[in-house]
Amino acid sequence: MKKICEGCIKNHVLKEHLIEANKSGDCSYCDNNSVKIIESEILIKFAGDRFVSSLYPISEATPYEAGMFFEGSNDIPFDEVGYIIQELEVGHETFEDELSTYVFEHSDCPDDLFIIDYGENDNNSYKSKWLQFVRSTANKHRFFNKDAKEFLDSPKFR
C-alpha cells in the first residue's frame, strides 16, 4: 500500500486531511522516513470524489460553451483532467497522475475534456437552483416555503 507524506501535498485541504489521519511512517513518493503520512488511496478517493462532483464534460456543456471552445476561445477552458489537476498544483507529480486517473475513471464519461464548475459557467447546477430559490421566495411564502427549505438544507449548498 502506497503512502504519501505532508511534504508531497501542496493543497492545504488535502494536507489538513493528511494531518488529521495522525499517522507516521515512510513516504512512498519522496522516500522520506518518519513523517506524517496517509495511504494515498484514501487521499485520492477524498480528493477524487470532490473533483468528480465539480467537473463536467464538454458533452454536458451548453451549445454556447462548446462553441466557444471549438472556435478556439480561451474564455471557457475545457481541458483534460490531468492538466486541470496540474494547474491546481495538488502535489507530487505521480500522485497527481494517480488522482487524474481516478477522476477520469469515476466520471462515467467517455469525453476527455472537462471544465471546473465554479458556478460562473452557463451550465451549472448552482445557478438554476439559486434562480428557483429566488423565484420561490419572491412569489410564495418566505416562511414555511418547501422549495426554500430544500435549497437551504441541501448538503451541496452548505
Image (cartoon, rainbow, N blue to C red):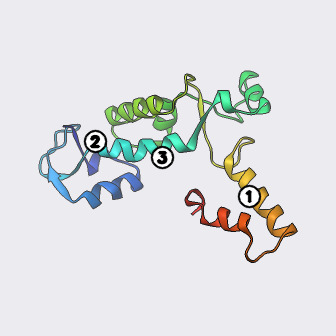
Q: Earlier in the sequence, mark 3 or mark 1?
A: 3
- Per the image, the residue denoted by label 1 is 130
Amino acid type at image mark 2 = Ser
- Determine the residue positioned at 51% across, 40% down: 52
The residue closer to the viewer here, 122 or 130, is 130
Quarter of the image for residue 99 reads top left
Of callouts 2 and 3, the N-terminal one: 2
Quadrant showing the C terminus:
bottom right
The residue labelled by disc 2 is 40
Q: Nearer the viewer, mark 1 or mark 2?
A: 1
Mark number for residue 50?
3
Amino acid type of the residue that numbered disc 1 sits on in the rendered structure? Trp
Q: Position of residue 43 (x, y in %)?
A: 33, 46
SS at mark 3? Answer: helix
Between 117 and 15, the one nearer to me in the picture: 117
The residue located at (12%, 46%) in the rendering is: 33
